[in-house]
Amino acid sequence: MNAEANAWLVSCAVSPDAVWRAWKADQLAPISSTAWTVVEAPLLPSLDAMQPLGRMGRLGPVLGCPEDNLACWLVGDKAQEHLGDLPELTVRAPGWRLPCPAVGQYSGGRGWVQRPDGSGLLTDPVDLAAAFGSPDPRRTGAGA
């Protein structure tokens, strides 16, 4: 499973060779990707938010950074639109460099709390907003 997950992460990177080199040297690889958006959130609330998403089968990769009390969620399209109003979340611009270890490794104070599965599954930003307490506009009829 780790091989497929790592292959997927590398396939999303702008510089795949640089990622492999960093991991072979037991270093964090700064992955810059346009395949996802990184959303930073406090670690403990993120662990709570992961529970309902996991039960629904809608939980994408989450990188944990305990030393920084931070979780980095890999989310799909329109993250800023759905998450920009939640003050506890920081939506990074597409292509932002995420320093991350290989799947199954812990390095530089970082490790995968929810590992990528290699399928490309990302957390939907609407689901993430709901998990952090924001109402889902698709359920409330807002904007309709």
Image (spheres, helix red, strand yellow):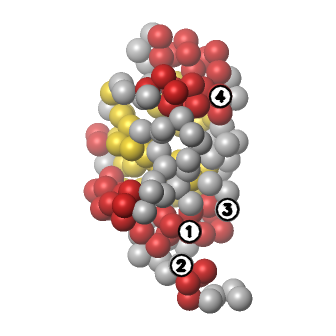
Write down the residue under mark 3: 78
**Disc 3 versus disc 1: distance between alpha carbons?**
9 Å
Whichever of labels 4 and 2 marks the residue nearer the N terminus, that label is 4
Asked if disc 1 and disc 2 are in contact, CB closer than 8 Å, the reply is yes
Q: Mark 2: which amino acid?
A: Asp
Asked if disc 3 and disc 1 are in contact, CB closer than 8 Å, the reply is no
Write down the residue under mark 2: 136
**Disc 2 versus disc 3: distance between alpha carbons?**
14 Å
Q: Please name the residue shown 36% across and 34% down the image.
A: 110
Write down the residue under mark 4: 11
Q: How crowded is mark 4: few (under 14 residues within 10 Å), some or many (20 or more)?
A: some
Q: In which quarter of the image is the N terminus?
A: top left
**Disc 1 versus disc 2: distance between alpha carbons?**
6 Å
Write down the residue under mark 1: 126
Whichever of labels 3 and 4 marks the residue nearer the N terminus, that label is 4
Camera-nearest residue between 108 and 55: 55
Q: Mark 3: which amino acid?
A: Lys
**In the image, is residue 142 above or below residue 9?**
below
Camera-nearest residue between 142 and 68: 142
Numbered disc 1: secondary structure: helix
Numbered disc 4: secondary structure: helix
Q: Position of residue 36 (x, y in %)?
A: 63, 46
Relative to 71, is 91 on the left or the right?
right
